[in-house]
Amino acid sequence: MPKQIQVGKETIIQEAKKLIEEKLIGINSMEELNAIKSEFLGKKGFITELQGLIKEVENDKKKEFGMKLNEVKSLFNSKYEEIKSKIEEDIINKRLEEEAIDVTLPSDGICTGSLHPFNRIIEEVEDLFVSMGYDVVDGPELETDEYCFKRLNVPEGHPARDMQDTFYITNEYLLRTQTSSSQAHTMEDSISKEPIRMICPGKVYRRDDDATHSHQFGQVEGLVVDKDISLADLKGTLEIFAKKLIGENTKVRFRPSYFPFTEPSVEVDLSCFKCGGKGCNLCKGTGFIEVLGAGMVHPDVLRMGGYDPKVYTGFAFGTGLDRLAMFKYNIPDIRYLYTNDIRMLKQFDRKDEE
């Protein structure tokens, strides 16, 4: 740095410009550039020390000296930003070059998603019943004891409650064990008590867990209430349902049973999809697997829903959507539906949906 300050001459400006040009030649990294910045603008930098000398300048020359210092500082900042931009651009270009993708190489293929078999079976069931004139109704999964049991002719203390092993949240609220509770709501909400044709698909919860049962599973319940509804209507509806959904060769077997909300009641078995009805470990050698529970709506259930059982009759049915998916897609274990095993899910690609 010059010992003598000659404000009227270009000594300081020329020396500063020359030094800046010399120092910034050949800078290729931000580390080097920042080091030079500290050398000029740091606490003991060249330009910083020049600014400290302004007090030695005569008063009438201070303004001119300050302007020349600002000119030097602006020159350095301009050069600094120019080199900085070039370095950053070089870094980006180098990264792009290193990460470049050769578009001429063969592709690994694009994995496309598809509907989960559980969702697929829901859509198929809904489409089938809508085509038959049914409404699709939704209902709450957190249900009250009244609608899940009492209005379905399952009073407090009834042994059927123990059979179902319900998940109770409180003494009054529970996770619904069946979507039949939506049937009770639908009958109650029908102000003019017009005929009903409805299904209610959704999740239900019970304490089952084996190859054909799960503690959480999907279920669809159906309800028809009208005048002159008979067991023959129920039988015909379920046969159409089984053959249209599973296959025309599906055999349907009806067995007498008992449910508190239907009278008479039946259990419906379909021929085993694994052995074709010959008998295997899945169907326990019987050739059939239980799929549905059904029956004629109990008069007390109609009465609690506001329908006169002397005028109206009806039928109801319920089946597990997971179990239907097993039949439809030949899935041997119901638990496969919840493992998220990509090997199984890949079998249900979008090609089948086109």
Image: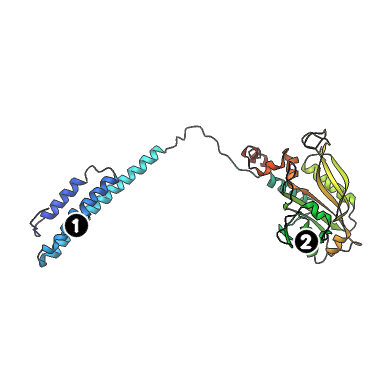
Horizontal relation, residue 267 to residue 97: left or right: right
Give me the C-alpha separation between circle 1 and circle 2: 84 Å
Describe the element under mark 2 as helix, strand or loop.
Answer: helix
Q: Residues within 10 Å of mark 2 (few under 14, many from 20)?
A: some
Query: Is the C-beta separation of discs 1 and 2 under 8 Å?
Result: no
- The front one of 114 and 293 is 293
254 lies above or below 50:
above
- The front one of 287 and 200 is 287
Report x, y in % for residue 318: 79, 50
- The front one of 83 and 270 is 270
Figure disc tally: 2
Q: Which mark is residue 274?
A: none
Report x, y in % for residue 177: 75, 54
Q: Which residue, given by chain and number where applicable, does mark 1 sit on?
A: 48
Q: Residues within 10 Å of mark 1 (few under 14, many from 20)?
A: some
Quadrant for the C terminus in the image: top right
28 lies above or below 308:
above
Report x, y in % for residue 33: 26, 47
The residue depicted at 11 percent of the width and 63 percent of the height is 56
The residue depicted at 86 percent of the width and 50 percent of the height is 234
Residue 88 seen from this side: yes
The residue type indicated by label 1 comes to Thr
- The front one of 66 and 280 is 280
The residue type indicated by label 2 comes to Tyr
Task: Tell me the colour scheme of the image.
Answer: rainbow
Describe the element under mark 1 as helix, strand or loop.
Answer: helix
Q: Which residue, given by chain and number where applicable, does mark 2 sit on?
A: 147
Horizontal relation, residue 180 to residue 227: left or right: left
Report which quarter residue 285 is drawn in. Answer: top right
Return the disc, 1 or 2, that comes first in the chain's sequence: 1
Report x, y in % for residue 57: 10, 63
